[in-house]
Image: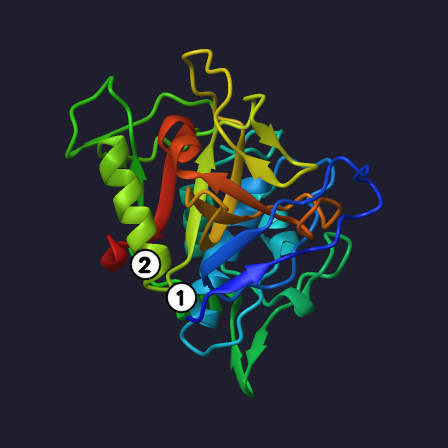
């Protein structure tokens, strides 16, 4: 893809001394419109659905999926926490069990649950539709933890992992390499990690390492939609967040590779993209 220099005008919320940084875009994969999760704790659902959407958009399919459906289905699962928190694999498991529908079929949890999903003139049950956009075992979870052996499965001891899903443990360098290669090859990726660092600046749309407290907390999920570098040549992932568009880059963020290596809990991506 031809490299484009990204210059975005600051939004009104930015002061004159907080101009957006110019980044050179190396890869920008397709994605559906940025959404706003509001006060919900469903970032994992927004991010994983966004990764699946990007996967299909880059294959030439127009896929836009309903978070509202997923939220209603989670309410049916007796194991699920009342907070409705989860991980990327939680989304995969939910739609494999309960199905999914297109975004325009159910845009709000107040909407009536549709009985069927329609795509390109074909009619599906929600479960059939889910399997058409996300086949069983199509996506895998990769984690990085020095508490467990690398190149082996482990179950992360995280509150959000209430299903006790396994991740495949790899080194931070390997995780970075695998993720970069997946994005460069136009695959969708769901990222889960720590946003508590001072270097994570939603308003300015940039996540860089600053002061590190030595711990990595499980705070948030976003999808990765591209690659970029700054004026000094430092590489960044382009993240699609779910907090609306009111930041310097209309809801996107630029995460440095250093931040990614130190502050990632897991990524979820197509198995063949590893």
- Residue 203 sits above or below residue 195 on the image: below
At 65% from the left and 55% from the top, the residue drawn is: 34
Dot 1: what SS? helix
Label 2 close to label 1 by CB (< 8 Å): yes
Mark 1 crowdedness (10 Å alpha carbons): few <14, some 14-19, many ≥20? some
At 61% from the left and 69% from the top, the residue drawn is: 115
Residue 188 screen position, x and y as percent: 42, 58
Residue 66 screen position, x and y as percent: 61, 59
Camera-side residue: 129 or 265?
A: 265
Q: Distance of mark 2 from mark 1, alpha carbons? A: 7 Å
Q: Residue furthest right?
A: 12
Camera-side residue: 73 or 224?
A: 224
Q: Which residue matches tag 1?
A: 131
Q: Which residue matches tag 2?
A: 136
Is 20 on the left-hand or right-hand side of 265? right
Residue 32 screen position, x and y as percent: 59, 64
Mark 2 crowdedness (10 Å alpha carbons): few <14, some 14-19, many ≥20? few
Residue 239 screen position, x and y as percent: 52, 48
Camera-side residue: 226 or 120?
A: 226
Residue 229 visible in the snapshot: yes
**Which image quadrant for residue 58?**
bottom left
**Which image quadrant for residue 263?**
top left
Mark with earlier residue (2, 1): 1
At 28% from the left and 24% from the top, the residue drawn is: 145
- Residue 256 sits above or below residue 82 on the image: below
Colour mapping? rainbow
Q: Residue furthest front?
A: 232
- Residue 147 sits above or below residue 243 on the image: above
Residue 139 visible in the snapshot: no
């Amino acid at each position: 893809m031809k490299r484009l220099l990204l210059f975005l005008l600051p939004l009104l919320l930015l002061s004159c001394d907080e101009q957006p940084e110019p980044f050179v875009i190396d890869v920008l994969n397709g994605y559906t419109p940025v959404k706003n999760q509001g006060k919900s704790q469903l970032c994992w659902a927004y991010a994983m659905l966004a990764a699946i959407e990007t996967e299909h958009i880059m294959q030439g399919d127009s896929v836009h999926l309903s978070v509202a459906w997923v939220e209603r289905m989670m309410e049916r699962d007796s194991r699920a926490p009342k907070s409705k928190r989860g991980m990327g694999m939680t989304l995969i498991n939910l739609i494999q069990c309960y199905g999914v529908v297109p975004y325009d079929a159910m845009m709000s949890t107040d909407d009536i649950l549709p009985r069927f999903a329609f795509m390109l003139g074909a009619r599906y049950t929600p479960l059939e539709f889910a399997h058409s956009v996300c086949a069983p075992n199509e996506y895998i979870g990769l984690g990085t933890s020095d508490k467990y052996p690398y190149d082996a499965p482990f179950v992360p001891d995280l509150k959000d992992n209430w299903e006790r899903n396994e991740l495949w443990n790899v080194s931070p360098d390997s995780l970075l390499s695998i993720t970069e290669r997946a994005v460069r090859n136009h695959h969708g990726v769901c990222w889960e990690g720590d946003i508590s660092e001072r270097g994570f600046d939603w308003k300015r749309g940039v996540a860089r390492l600053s002061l590190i407290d030595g711990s990595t907390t499980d705070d948030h999920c976003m999808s990765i939609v591209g690659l970029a570098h700054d004026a000094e040549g430092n590489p960044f992932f382009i993240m699609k967040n779910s907090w609306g568009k009111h930041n310097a880059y209309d809801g996107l963020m630029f995460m440095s590779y250093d931040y990614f290596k130190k502050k990632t809990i897991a990524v979820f991506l197509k198995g063949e993209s590893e």
